[in-house]
């Protein structure tokens, strides 16, 4: 029987195969069970819901993190990478971020665009950098 944790792992493997191990290495000692809870709940239950495709869900995530502001920078960058992995173009990512200037303010949108520019540059960097 497939569990929500299994489904979450399938989604994470598609978006960022290194994410689960990175979460486990960073948080598991401090909050045992954190990684499985996050994977099962966020990805296995929310991202796996019908009604929106994965790319659209990721664009929504980028928009929300942008509107929340600068304190979400690390999560925003990770989700920009995931959004690109889900099939979004750079233009779709930057337009979702720019749309948040209306709702989160210009500073939030500027921070979001800066995060996107950094991720785009990382994607262009030669391997090993």
Image (cartoon, rainbow, N blue to C red):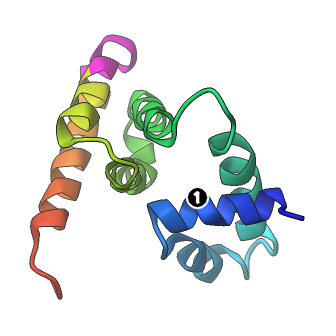
Name the foreground residue: 123 vs 70: 123
Residue positioned most to the top: 102
Q: Is residue 24 above or below residue 16?
A: below
User: In the depicted view, which residue is nearer to us: 82 or 108?
Assistant: 82
Q: Is residue 105 visible?
A: no
Tell me the residue at 41%/27% (across/down): 67
Quadrant of residue 20 within the rendered picture: bottom right
Q: Is residue 89 left or right of residue 102?
A: left
- Residue carrying label 1: 11
What quarter of the picture does the N terminus occupy?
bottom right
Q: Nearer the viewer, residue 24 or 47?
A: 47
- Give the residues drawn in magenta, as a range: 99-107
Predominant secondary structure, magenta span: helix
Q: Position of residue 47 (x, y in %)?
A: 62, 43
How many numbered circles are shown?
1
Magenta span contains residue 103:
yes
Q: Measured from the top left, where is residue 57 in percent x and y?
A: 51, 36
Rendered position, 39 above or below 48? below
Few, some or many residues within 10 Å of mark 1 (<14, 14–19, 20+)? some
Q: Residue at x 52, y 70 (%)?
A: 19
Task: List the single residue furthest toward the right.
Answer: 1
Residue 15 % position (x, y): 46, 60
> What SS does tag 1 mark?
helix
- The answer to whether 95 is drawn above or below residue 119 in the figure is above
Position in image of residue 91 (x %, y %):
18, 34
Question: Could one spot residue 120 in this view of the protein?
Answer: yes
Membership of 22 in magenta stretch: no
Q: Quadrant of the C terminus?
A: bottom left
Q: Residue at x 31, y 11 (%)?
A: 102
């Amino acid at each position: 029987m497939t569990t929500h944790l299994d489904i979450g792992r399938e989604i994470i493997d598609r978006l960022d195969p290194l994410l689960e191990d990175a979460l486990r290495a960073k948080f598991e000692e401090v909050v045992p069970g954190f990684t499985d809870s996050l994977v099962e709940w966020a990805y296995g239950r929310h991202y796996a819901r019908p009604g929106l495709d994965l790319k659209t869900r990721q664009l929504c995530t980028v928009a929300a993190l942008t509107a929340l502001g600068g304190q979400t920078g690390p999560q925003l960058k990770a989700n920009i990478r995931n959004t690109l992995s889900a099939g979004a173009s750079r233009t779709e990512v930057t337009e979702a971020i720019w749309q948040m200037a209306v709702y989160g303010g210009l500073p939030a949108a500027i921070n979001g665009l800066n995060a996107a520019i950094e991720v785009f540059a990382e994607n262009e960097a030669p391997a090993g950098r």
